[in-house]
């Protein structure tokens, strides 16, 4: 008999009842160190007092009005994002997938309004992940994501990850946009080198193609900059954001330049819940913390500490690990065993991690993790690796 919850996930047999900072407490009282953050979501950890206050204060006043009216919290969050980034304008969604839908629509509408309606193709890369909607799976293009769900949304081409030569050859008069994660998350923590991102930007400029960056997983302080593309010193035309921006409350956004957004006029897009007062009150508080230079400096310092300890861990378990890679607090351990087996061994050692493609285990701790917690995390990862060696 089918379970009452549609069985699209194979879940670990864990039921967390409470979260405190970097810790998750299981119903039976066991305390897990959280190096998953709900897959890069809980940027400020669990039950951060400022987020709890923002949410509960707003909950006592007003939950929902719809976008038929002005929403001051939405305006405030849009202003913060515009002030802190390349963007001139923001549309709020409830998830990364919805941000993908709008990013694709915005790119196509841009060229349509410019009198080039045949410019509809979007070029994406292997190993990418952009969500589970029709546009999201078509953008990813992998068999795993698309098999059985055809006919797929047309107009997507796929190239090898980082293959700029193939990209230059693939761009033609019908190319509307390129969509890429500056650091692939689900694909196995694969950062695009700064020089490649710079070359990609140049190519888009030279060939009149819009650049869509998917920073759903790598954005909002995760890499040590507010957004990952800042490391390369380039800016996109359109950017997808979600996960960390809500700190655990469902919130996403599409950020764009005035030019790229110029086709999106009244009535061209909408959302019942997008930009609601609860989500935006929380998002404002996340931004107030994460966008602060001293917060990002701490993320970079702690990332260096964690990285250094992980290099030692990899060196002391050559039969379990191949390498550590990633940027900031978006790190991956490439394993020689199945990543799922390591995640399971981690659960036994009371540490939560996330499997990814390319035999990688993701480490995505809350950005507020302390030095002591970093040391404890590596001790627990070491115990998991030792258990794998003995198995
Ligand atoms: C890079 C990237 N894009 C898009 C998504 C989809 O976001 P959501 O699950 O919020 O719809 C994800 C989710 O993991 C992601 O990592």
Image: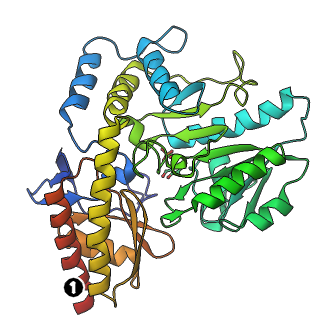
311 relative to 215, above or below: below
Quadrant of res 221:
top left
Q: Is residue 357 left or right of residue 135?
A: left
**In the image, is 175 to the left or to the right of 320?**
right
Total marks shown come to 1
Q: Is residue 4 visible?
A: no
Quadrant of the drawing holding the N terminus: bottom left
Depth check, front residue: 164 or 333: 164
Q: Which residue is mark 1?
A: 386
Instruction: Tell me what residue is drawn at x 23 percent, y 68 percent.
Output: 347
Q: Quadrant of the C terminus?
A: bottom left
Q: Is mark 1 within 8 Å of ligand 1?
A: no
Q: Depth check: give the residue in front, 195 or 117.
A: 195
Give the residue at x 24% y 47%.
Answer: 368
Residue 57 image-quadrant placement: top left
Q: Can residue 293 be seen from the camera position used here?
A: yes
Residue 308 x/y as whole percent: 29, 70
- The relative height of residue 72 versus residue 260 in the rendered view (above or below) is above
> Is disc 1 surrounded by few (<14), some (14 to 19) or many (20+) residues within 10 Å?
some
Q: Position of residue 184 (x, y in %)?
A: 53, 60
Q: Residue at x 22, y 43 (%)?
A: 46
């Amino acid at each position: 008999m089918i379970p009452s919850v549609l069985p699209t996930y194979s879940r670990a047999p864990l039921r967390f009842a409470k979260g405190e900072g970097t810790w998750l407490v299981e119903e039976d009282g066991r305390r897990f160190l959280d190096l998953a953050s709900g897959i890069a979501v809980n940027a400020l950890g669990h039950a951060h007092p400022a987020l709890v206050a923002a949410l509960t204060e707003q909950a006592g006043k007003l939950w929902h009005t719809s976008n038929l009216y002005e929403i001051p919290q939405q305006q405030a969050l849009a202003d913060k994002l515009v002030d802190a980034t390349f963007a001139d304008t923001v549309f709020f969604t409830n998830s990364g997938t919805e941000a993908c839908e709008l990013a694709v629509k915005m790119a196509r509408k841009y060229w349509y309004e410019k009198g080039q309606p045949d410019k509809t193709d979007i070029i994406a890369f292997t190993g990418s992940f952009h969500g589970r909607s029709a546009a999201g799976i078509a953008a990813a293009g992998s068999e795993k994501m698309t098999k059985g769900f055809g006919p797929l949304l047309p107009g997507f081409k796929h190239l090898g990850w980082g293959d700029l030569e193939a990209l230059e050859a693939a761009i033609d008069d019908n190319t509307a946009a390129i969509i890429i994660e500056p650091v692939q998350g689900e694909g196995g923590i694969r950062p695009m080198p700064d020089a490649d991102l710079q070359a990609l930007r140049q190519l888009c400029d030279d060939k009149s193609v819009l650049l869509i960056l998917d920073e759903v997983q790598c954005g909002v302080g995760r890499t040590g900059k507010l957004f990952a593309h800042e490391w390369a010193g380039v800016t996109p035309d359109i950017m997808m954001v979600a996960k960390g921006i809500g700190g655990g409350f469902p919130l996403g956004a599409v950020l764009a330049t005035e030019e790229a957004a110029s086709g999106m006029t009244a009535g061209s897009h909408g959302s019942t819940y997008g930009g609601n007062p609860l989500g935006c009150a929380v998002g404002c508080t996340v931004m107030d913390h994460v966008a602060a230079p001293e917060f990002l400096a701490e993320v970079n310092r702690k990332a260096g500490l964690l990285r250094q300890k992980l290099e030692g861990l990899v060196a002391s378990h050559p039969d379990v690990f191949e390498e550590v890679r990633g940027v900031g607090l978006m790190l991956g351990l490439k394993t020689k065993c199945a990543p799922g087996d390591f995640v399971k061994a981690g659960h036994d050692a009371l540490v939560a991690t996330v499997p990814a493609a390319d035999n990688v285990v993701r480490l995505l701790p809350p950005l507020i993790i302390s030095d002591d917690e970093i040391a404890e995390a590596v001790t627990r990862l070491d115990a998991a690796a030792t258990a794998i060696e003995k198995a």
